[in-house]
Amino acid sequence: MDILDDANKGLDFVDKIEKLLEKLKNYKPEIKSLRVNYLTKATEIKLLIKVPQGIKRHFRDLEIPAYPGYSIKEVFDGTTLDRINVDWQLKNQNWIADAKVLGASDRYLVILEGSISDVALERLVKLYCPEDPKRGSDVDRYWIDSAIKDMAIMEKIYDELTLDKVTTCVNVGVERQFTSSIPKEVKNWFRARAEADIHLRTMDRQKAFKSYYFLRLAEKKLGKLSPLEVRNLAKQVLSPETFMYYVSVDKPFHISHLNPVEEGHWLPEKIGVIVETDLSYKNPVAQGDLIYKKIDFASKLEEEIKKLPGLPEKLKRA
Amino acid sequence: MEFINVYIAPWVLSKQVFPIHCVWKPEKALSKIVATIPQGYKLHETLNFVNYAFDDAKNTISVDVKDLKSNNYFGIILKHRGIIEEVEQRDAVIIDFQGAKGISLKTTTLYTRIVRPKLEFMNFPREIVVTNSTNLKNLITLEVLHKGFGTANTTTEVMHSGDFISKSDSLYFKVLKETLERISRIYEEPLELKGEIEPLDDELIRKIADDIFKSPTRENLPFELDKEETELLKEIMKDKSKQEEVYRVVYASLRSLVLAALLYYGEKHPLEDIKMIDGKVVATIKEKTDELLIRIRYFDSAENEYPPIEDKIKVLDRRDPEKQKEFETPINIIWKKDTLNLED
C-alpha cells in the first residue's frame, strides 16, 4: 500500500462523518461528542437524531448509511436515556430498523464506533520530548509536551472532541547506573574469564596456561560467578515490573507501560517509558516532567548484584 | 486578555523541533496574532491553524483569529537551523496579540534555549618518553572536560600515515573477531568444539548470532568488516544448513562474548553524558614515530556533529635501538564534567 492510499484513508475518516451527516439531514443530526483513543485508534461518535412521529408513520423504517469501518454500537432514547434494542438489517449500504421499536420518543442518541488511521492521528496530535535529560545529582528530568495540532478535521463538527491516551515514548538512559554498579573486582573477573576462554579456544598452550593461571587467581578471589547470571540480573532489574518504581511523571500524564530498548550488545541502554494523557478541544495542550530516580535505581542494582549466587562474602559485605 | 497556558520547551538541541504554544480565555477583541521568530530558526509546523502570512523582512508570522481552528489556542513548532558555538544560546520569540487596527492587547516574550555538549582538553601531555622499562598501558593519559549539556557521542582517533584512525582496544572486538574468524572457517574445516561449556539458553544463542550476522554493518558490529568478509558472512547466513553451525560457534564463544559485551558496555559509558563509541582506543607507535596527533570527534543525540578537538604529543623513543619495535599503547582518557546549569 502506498503513502497516498494511507493519506486518503486518513481523510476518509472525515469524509465518512460528513457524508453520514449529509445523508441523515432529515433527522437533524447533531454530533454530541467524538472520542478518539490514540492507543487503540478506536473512535466513538455520539450522534443525536430527531425522528418525529410524522416521519415514523410515513417511512416506517429508520435508515442510517453504512460505510466500511463504522458500525452502530448502541441506540438510546434521547429523553429517558433508556437503551433500545434495535434489530438492524444491512440493505443496500444502509442500516435499516423498524421505526416501531423506537417507541414514543422523538430524540435518539446513536453511538457509532470505528477507527482512525495513523495518518489522520498524526495530523491530529503532536508530542514532543527531548533526547537528553537535565541531570540532577539524584534524578534526571525530561520535559514532555503534547498538543492538538490540527483541528481542521474536527472543524464545525465537534465541540466535544476527546483524545484519550495520547502517548509518547521517553527514552530514559540507564547505562551509567548499570555500569557503575558492577564492582571493579567482578569486572576483573569477567576479563580474566573471557581472555582464558579465547586462549583455550585458540589452543595456544603458553597463553592458555598463563590466562588459566590468572583465571584461577580471579576465581579464588571471586568464586564462580556466571556471566549469564549477571545478564539475567540486568534483564530482571530493567524489566518493566521492577523499573517502573524508578520513573514517575507529572499530571496530567501518567505512565502507560515500559519498553526496554536494546541497542545491540544484548543489554538495554535505554528504557522506553510510554507516557499518556488525554487531550480535548477544550484542553488542547498538556505539559509535564518525567523523572528518573537514578540514585535509587543504582542502589537497587547494587543490592541485587550482592544477591548473586557465587559472589564471595567479601564483596557482598562491601 | 487572560492566558490559561503559555509554554516553550525548556531546552532542546540544535536541529531538534520544539513547541511553543499559548491558550487563553476566549477574547472577543482579539483579531490577529503576530509572532516574531528569531534569526536562525525555521518555522517547522503550525498548531491549530493552516493559513498565515509570513513577513520575510521582519521574520514574523501573522494569523487572523478567524483562521484559528479553535479560537483560543495558538502554537508553532520551531527548529534551530545550525549548530551553536557556545554551550547554550537563548533567543526571544515575541508573540503579540492584537485587537482592531493592530493595537496590542497583550504581548508575551518567550526565550528559546538551544544547548549542546562541548568538549575541551583539560590536561594534554606535551610529550611522552618511551624507555625500555616504560609501562605501555599508562603511557598516554588525557583529561577531557565535558562542558555544556547532553550526551557527547565520541570517537577518539589517532593520525596514522596521514589518516585519522580509531582502533579499539576493547576485548569485545577481539572476541567478536575471533568468533567471526571461526565462522569463516566453517566452510574450510569441520567444526570441532573444545573446552568446557556451560549449559546456556538456546534462545539467547540464536539471538546473539542473529544480532551479529543479520546485517554485518557498523550498527551491529563495533568495527567495519571489509567487503569480502561481509559477503562471506552473508553467504554463510543464507545457507540454512550452515546456520546451525554458526549457532554452535557462537555457543562455544558465548561466555566470552557475553562477558566481553558487559565490559564493553561499561567502557562505552565512562561518565554520564559521555559515550565512547569504540570503547578505549589504542595508538600505534612505530619505529620512527616522533609525533602523535590525537583527535576526538563528537556528535550530540540529535546527530549534530561539532568541530573536533585535537592536539599533538611529541614522542621521544629512548629505548635501545635494537628494542625499538612497533607497539600499541592505549589512550587513557579521564573524563570530567562541568554541566551547564539550566536553572534560570
Image: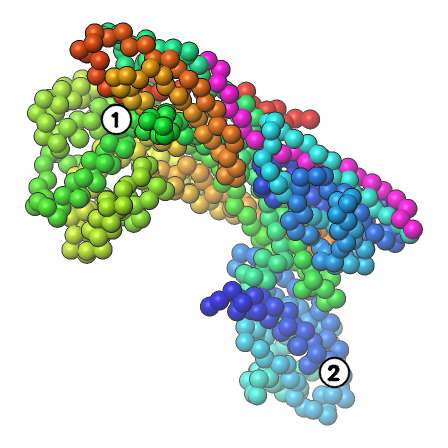
Quarter containing the C terminus of chain A: top left
Characterize the magenta stretch by its predominant secondary structure: strand
The x, y position of residue A190, in whole percent, is 25, 26
- Residue A287 at least partly seen: no
Same-chain check, marks 1 and 2:
yes
A87, above or below A302, in the image: below
The x, y position of residue B330, in whole percent, is 32, 20
Range of residues picked out in magenta: B101-123
Q: Which mark is residue A190?
A: 1
Q: Callout 2: 10 Å neighbours few (<14), some, many (20+)?
A: few
Would you identify the image quadrant in which residue A180 lies?
A: top left
Mark positioned earlier in the residue sequence (1 or 2) = 2
Chain of residue at mark 2:
A
Would you identify the image quadrant in which residue A288 lies?
A: top right
The x, y position of residue A62, in whole percent, is 66, 85
Determine which residue is flagged by label 2: A26
Helix, strand or loop status at disc 1: helix
The x, y position of residue B42, in whole percent, is 66, 45
Q: Which mark is residue B158?
A: none
B68, above or below A21, in the image: above
- Residue at 8%, 41% in the rendered image: B192
- Residue at 61%, 27% in the rendered image: B86
**Residue type at the position of mark 1:** Phe
- Residue at 44%, 26% in the rendered image: B296
**Residue type at the position of mark 2:** Asn
A176, above or below B110, in the image: above
Is residue B25 or residue B277 the one in the foreground? B277
Is residue A297 or residue A132 the one in the foreground? A132
**Circle 1/circle 2 CB separation < 8 Å:** no
